[in-house]
Amino acid sequence: MANGYRVAVVGATGQVGTLMLQLLRERGFPASEIVPFASERSVGRELDGGLIVRGLDEDSIQGFDVALFSAGGSTSGEWAPRFAATGAVVIDNSSRWRMQDDVPLVVSEVNPEALATHKGIIANPNCSTMQMVVALKPLQDAAGIERLVVSTYQAVSGTGRGAVEELLDQSHALLHEQGIQEPQQYAHQIAFNVLPHAGSFAAGDDHTDEERKLINETRKILGDPSIRVSATCVRVPVVTGHSEAVNVQTRDELSPERARELLAGAPGVIVLDDPAAASYPLAIDAAGRDGVFVGRIRRDPGHERAIDMWVVADNLRKGAATNAVQLAELLHERELLGGARATQPA
């Protein structure tokens, strides 16, 4: 990659795809060319920076080193293998590939070694799982984890731009004592409300797919299928920033003081934990930042080996786009991209 990598961003006009393009520029990823792809209705559109959106076809996908996907599961299912077949490494943000046994599910601060096992496709975890495992990793390394009880408070931007607009429209209407339109994005009004229903219920399942993702992805990323996980995912009227109440039952004794020290020294973690001074993580403070914020670290009075903590992160950045770009950076640093390998001496 003497002159940089050719990078594709698939789903480039969506919330996460737009942010991927921004972060590639801001973080100085060594790209010779960045090509945005999107649906047919966006083809030909000029994006910030002068990039022109292209459509997906067999000719347009040739010659890329890495492809960042944020275009939904069906698009990823069809086009990620096609990009991989051309020699590109795909980093996919959908749920399509996460639980495939031969596809690594990777968080940059947690299990970067898994990148070396890729066969052309790497999965980016669900946003709620992502921020939680960043906070869990130092605790797991120090004391092991037996059980997790998690309640999430998820922002509407995790559903998409339409959900953000619906929240703002409903809020405006209610504040002006006007009626609201029939909800389209959620089963119920989201403004000034809390919905114990983030994600979708599959037939016959009393857990949502968001809850199943938290359970299954956490085990895969942390490499321990024996971890017991109880999850309740809740949608709240917040634009950006997922919050989580996490109860961690460890295998070995771990004091809150030691947990606080471990978290303060962990990559990607920012500890804000002075409740007497009202210092703790807030969604509005995490929005627009790449760290995982942790506070309210305390002993669970109901169990001598359990700790409670509060975890907050920007679901569009670290929960999606930032981690994808970080994985591309790690592939470059570890010489796991085709362009990097091609330039190594024989």
Image: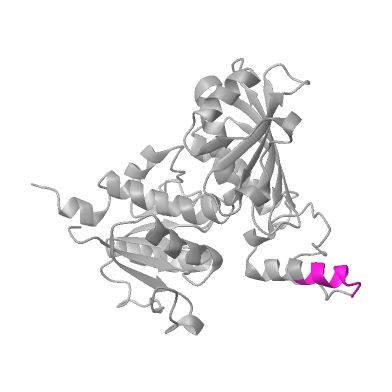
Return the x and y of residue 72 as percentages of the image width and height. Answer: 53, 65
Vertical placement of residue 39 versus 20, above or below:
below
Q: Is residue 174 located in the magenta-colored stretch of the structure?
A: yes
Q: Is residue 322 visible?
A: yes
Quarter of the image with the N terminus is bottom left
Identify the residue at image location x=70%, y=25%. Answer: 298
Q: Residue 282's quadrant in the figure? A: top right
Q: Is residue 225 visible?
A: no
* 185 with respect to 72 (left or right): right
* Start-end of magenta stretch: 169-178
The front one of 228 and 316 is: 316
* 45 with respect to 159 (left or right): left
Farthest front residue?
A: 277
Return the x and y of residue 223 as percentages of the image width and height. Answer: 49, 34
Tell me which secondary structure the magenta stretch mostly adopts. helix
Q: Residue 198's quadrant in the figure? A: bottom right
Q: Residue 280's quadrant in the figure? A: top right
The front one of 206 and 160 is: 160
* 181 with respect to 152 (left or right): right
Identify the residue at image location x=67%, y=71%. Answer: 162
User: What kind of colouring is applied to the model shown?
Assistant: one colour
Q: Is residue 135 located in the magenta-colored stretch of the structure?
A: no
Farthest right residue?
A: 177
Vertical placement of residue 125 versus 34, above or below:
above
Count of marks, rendered view = 0
The front one of 166 and 83 is: 166
Return the x and y of residue 126 as percentages of the image width and height. Answer: 56, 51
Identify the residue at image location x=55%, y=20%. Answer: 143
